[in-house]
């Protein structure tokens, strides 16, 4: 039996690394695109090629960049994937305000470049586009579903809106098998260190270790629907196993503030937070030791922020049979315990 070929972009990131492992285990020949960086940023996929080889499986990396059609064309032409998962992005919403043009090039035009590769070569590739709850932005309706109107609030969100629509356009216009997974926030011990969840658990572990600096954060009132990245990559795969391409919300249906995330993580780390003050003056001290644990740094406020995300994943449950296994409390524990363990703490 010939094995299916999958091509994954963004493989050095959180989701790409979990998805590549998942697909290798499923028996796919996995090809992946990594961009050139001055230092090797391959920690998340360390050893995957060797492990795949030992089991007679394939995991192969190719240098490419979403801003460079020549590399994308050559990789798509050589690998001729049955399934293409486009996860590459400048994915930090806050930084997209500082790098709006670059973000647009990679997050919006990058998708067009990849779609054009597949279309112009006449391939029968199933295409997954990493769409996002950031499309909903201003929160016109709660919970947000596939029919909720979009109103993005950042250069990242606006770029993903283009990516969503160009993907849909290639599906409708050319009859291509293109699917948008509208994923709500999902986290893991592999989450980038400057997203609020991982930043919090890393810093709290360091504070537990005796480091003095408090955790400095921005908007604590924002609400997010946080799930577990390992659960979410399975949903991506399930979407491409459907004969008809479509768009799906992937979410837990629970929403929590950043403050709640911090308080729960602090509890797991052995602190009991006492909050005081308001707005930029808000602080949290540890009740037992009196130590300052959290303070506000307005540098982390965004020009406009998404205040409330809560997803309605009933279509995914109905059609894909997908449901989240890990919810908020367990998720916070997974992240916090992993960062404590990395410092030899429990
Ligand atoms: P991530 O950890 O930031 O990973 C992004 C990946 O894209 C990395 O491998 C990065 O490479 C790569 N990349 C960045 N710019 C590139 C370029 N110009 N050319 C090629 N590759 C490039 O993101 P993630 O959390 O895994 O998210 C995966 C995808 O899902 C992203 O598209 C994100 O926007 C979207 N998404 C994420 C969430 C979430 O909560 N995690 C929710 C909805 C949608 P380097 O390692 O070299 O930086
Ligand atoms: O922020 C607030 C911040 O950066 C969450 C990306 O994966 O999910 C992610 O985007 C909230 C925001 O994630 C800090 O203002 C407070 O309200 O962890 P975040 P995000 O912006 O929701 C979506 C679905 C994606 O698609 C994106 O790719 O937390 N916040 N203080 C902070 N955020 C950060 N990063 N750092 C702080 O110090």
Image (cartoon, rainbow, N blue to C red):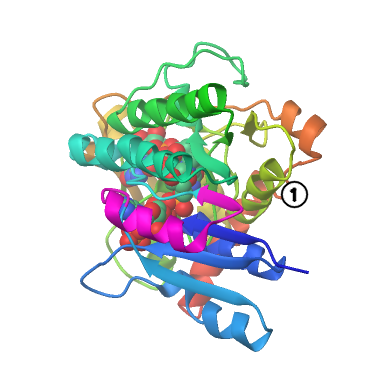
Q: Where on the image, by quarter, is ligand 2? A: top left
Q: Quadrant of the C terminus?
A: bottom right
Q: Is residue 96 left or right of residue 271?
A: left
The magenta region covers 66-85
Q: Is residue 140 above or below residue 14?
A: above
Quadrant of the image occupied by residue 280: top left
Q: Secondary structure at mark 1?
A: loop
Q: Position of residue 267 (x, y in %)?
A: 56, 54
Q: Residues within 10 Å of mark 1 (few under 14, many from 20)?
A: few
Q: Position of residue 235 (x, y in %)?
A: 68, 45
- Observer-nearest residue: 169 or 34? 169
Q: Position of residue 6 (x, y in %)?
A: 58, 59
Query: Which residue is label 1 attached to?
Result: 325
Q: Quadrant of the N terminus?
A: bottom right
Q: Residue at x 36, y 72 (%)?
A: 210
Q: Residue at x 50, y 57 (%)?
A: 8
Quadrant of the image occupied by residue 128: top right
Q: Position of residue 275 (x, y in %)?
A: 42, 39
Any part of residue 163 in sight: yes
Any part of residue 262 in sight: no
- Observer-nearest residue: 306 or 91? 91
Q: Residue at x 64, y 69 (%)?
A: 24
Task: Examine the structure image and report whether residue 147 is included in the region drawn in magenta.
Answer: no
Q: Is residue 279 left or right of residue 197?
A: left
Q: Is residue 339 left or right of residue 161?
A: right
Q: Is residue 188 above or below residue 221?
A: below
């Amino acid at each position: 039996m010939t094995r299916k070929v999958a091509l994954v972009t963004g493989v050095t990131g959180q989701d790409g690394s979990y998805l590549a492992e998942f697909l290798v285990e499923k028996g796919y020949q996995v090809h992946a695109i990594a961009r050139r960086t001055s230092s090797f940023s391959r920690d998340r996929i360390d050893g995957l090629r060797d492990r795949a080889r030992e089991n007679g499986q394939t995991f192969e990396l190719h240098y490419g960049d979403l801003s460079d059609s020549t590399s994308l064309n050559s990789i798509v032409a050589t690998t001729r994937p049955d399934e293409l998962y486009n996860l590459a992005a400048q994915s930090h919403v806050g930084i997209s305000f500082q790098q709006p043009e670059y973000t647009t090039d990679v997050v919006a035009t990058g998708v067009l470049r990849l779609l054009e590769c597949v279309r112009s070569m006449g391939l029968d590739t199933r295409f997954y586009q990493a769409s996002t709850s950031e499309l909903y932005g201003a929160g016109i309706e709660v919970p947000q579903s596939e029919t909720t109107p979009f109103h993005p609030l950042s250069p990242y969100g606006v770029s993903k809106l283009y990516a969503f629509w160009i993907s849909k356009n290639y599906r409708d216009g050319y009859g291509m098998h293109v699917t948008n997974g509208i994923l709500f926030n999902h986290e893991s011990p592999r989450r980038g260190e400057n997203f609020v969840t991982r930043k919090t658990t890393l810093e709290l572990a360091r504070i537990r270790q005796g480091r003095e600096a408090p955790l400095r954060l921005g908007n604590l009132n924002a609400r997010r629907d946080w799930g577990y990245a390992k659960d979410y990559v399975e949903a991506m795969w399930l979407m491409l196993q459907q004969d008809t391409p479509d768009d799906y919300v992937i979410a837990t249906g629970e929403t929590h503030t950043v403050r709640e995330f911090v308080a729960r993580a602090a509890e797991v780390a052995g602190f009991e937070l006492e909050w005081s003050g308001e707005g930029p003056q808000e602080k949290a001290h540890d009740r037992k030791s009196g130590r300052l644990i959290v303070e506000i740094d307005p540098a982390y406020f965004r020009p406009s922020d998404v205040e409330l995300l809560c997803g309605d994943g009933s279509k995914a449950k109905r059609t894909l049979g997908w449901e989240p296994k890990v919810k908020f409390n367990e998720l916070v524990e997974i992240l916090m315990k992993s960062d404590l363990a990395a410092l030899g703490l429990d």
